[in-house]
Image (cartoon, rainbow, N blue to C red):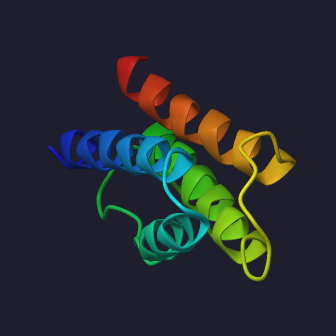
Amino acid sequence: MSDDQSLIKARYCRSILKVAAISTDQEARGLLESLATEQPTPNASAAMAEAERAALSAIRELAGSQHGRSKSQSSSEWMRAARAIQLWLNAHDE
């Protein structure tokens, strides 16, 4: 059941990242900072927990990199976060 909760969180993070991509810089920073406060889902399977930790870490790095600069969807932090979220989603299907 915790994997299902983690999957919902992964989908939520993917959706917020997409919204942040089309938002103003200030809105995007707020959205990313909100995602950066997410905590790991307790009792998730090992594969799901590992993918979730990696994605949340990438999101925190992205949120931290946005302070004082405009967002760029092509930045390495942005791409890393998007890839990590996709790997998190894929971990549920394995």
35 or 45: nearer the eye? Answer: 35
> What residue appears at the point 37 percent right and 18 percent down from the top-left corner?
93
Identify the residue at the far front of this view: 24
The furthest residue to the left = 1
Please count the marks in the image. 0
> Is 57 placed above or below 74 here?
below
Foreground residue among 46 and 12: 12
Looking at the image, the residue that sits furthest to the top is 94
At a point 55% along the width and 60% down the height, the residue shown is 56
Image side of residue 11 versus residue 89, left or right: left
**Vertically, is 94 above or below 50?**
above
- Residue 27, image x, y percentages: 47, 69
Q: Residue furthest bottom?
A: 68
Residue 45 appears at what percent x and percent y?
37, 43
Instruction: State which quarter of the image contains the C terminus.
Output: top left
- Relative placement, left or right, of 33 versus 7 is right
Seen from the viewer's position, the closer of residues 15 and 55 is 15
Rendering coords of residue 71 (x, y %)? 71, 59
